[in-house]
Image (spheres, grey):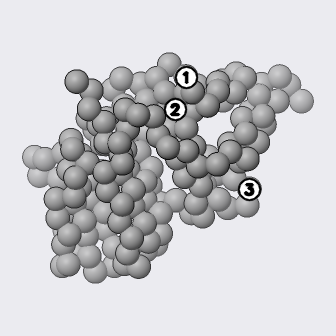
Amino acid sequence: MSNSEDNVRDSLIRLHRAPEMVPPKSWMPRVYLYSDEINGAGFAGSAFSSSDCIVVQGASRGWIIDAESGIMLSDRKDDAAGIDTVGLAKHTPDGWTAELVVEPDDWDIAVLVAPGVSLFAGAFPGWDVVTKIKSFHTLRAWGFSPSGNTLVLLAPGMVWSYWRSRE
């Protein structure tokens, strides 16, 4: 096995064994939703109308989260299916990265990586710049709003969002 393959394998083993962690202090938890209605059809996206928002869809209900503040704006009992959405960004303008590592046992690991760091380019960079946010069976979406201020994680039946101020 080459040195780079060893580095990747080492990083995967560390991520698998590590507990879930609290995000860095600059990322504050904002929204936690639990609903049986957030199901396999669930989708997270951003940008509807002229606003910068995150849209979470369920079978007969939708939620809208302000991407600048991370605060829930609406709990739409009539569904959010009519709102056009786009995918979540995997990088912020200032370099944060949302990695999704799929494990062989069908568990997904959502990882937040600090600017200037590559998770798999060399030796494991360390827990001061890598944060294992969640490990969950079948994560649906994981990424940032276009501004890079809100981070969203969507799993069957659950949604988490984190917000940061760059002032």
Residue at screen point 41% across, 24% down: 95
Q: Picture coordinates of residue 5 (x, y %)?
A: 80, 30
Q: Pointer 1: residues within 10 angstroms few (<14), some, or many (20+)?
A: some
Quick one: 1 or 117, which is closer to the camera? Answer: 117
Q: Nearer the viewer, mark 3 or mark 2?
A: 2
**What's the CA distance linking mark 1 and mark 3?**
25 Å
User: How far across and how far down the image is residue 71, in percent?
Assistant: 22, 52
Judging from the image, what secondary structure is the residue with disc 2 in? strand
Q: Is residue 103 above or below residue 1?
A: below
> Mark 2 = which residue?
113
Is the residue 11 above or below the residue 106 in the image?
A: above
Amino acid marked by disc 3: Pro
Disc on res. 117: 1
- Which residue is identified by label 3? 104
The kind of residue on which mark 1 rests is Val
Q: Are marks 2 and 1 in contact (CB under 8 Å)?
A: yes
> In whole angstroms, how far apart are the C-alphas of marks 2 and 1?
7 Å
Residue at screen point 57% across, 27% down: 128
Q: Residue 45, relative to residue 151: is it above or below?
A: below
Residue extending farthest left: 50
**Circle nearer the viewer, 1 or 3:** 1
Q: Is residue 85 left or right of residue 11?
A: left
Could you say where residue 12 lies in the image, as x and y percent from the top left?
Answer: 72, 41
> Does residue 127 appear to the left or right of 10 in the view shown?
left
Mark 3 or mark 2: name the one nearer the start of the chain: 3
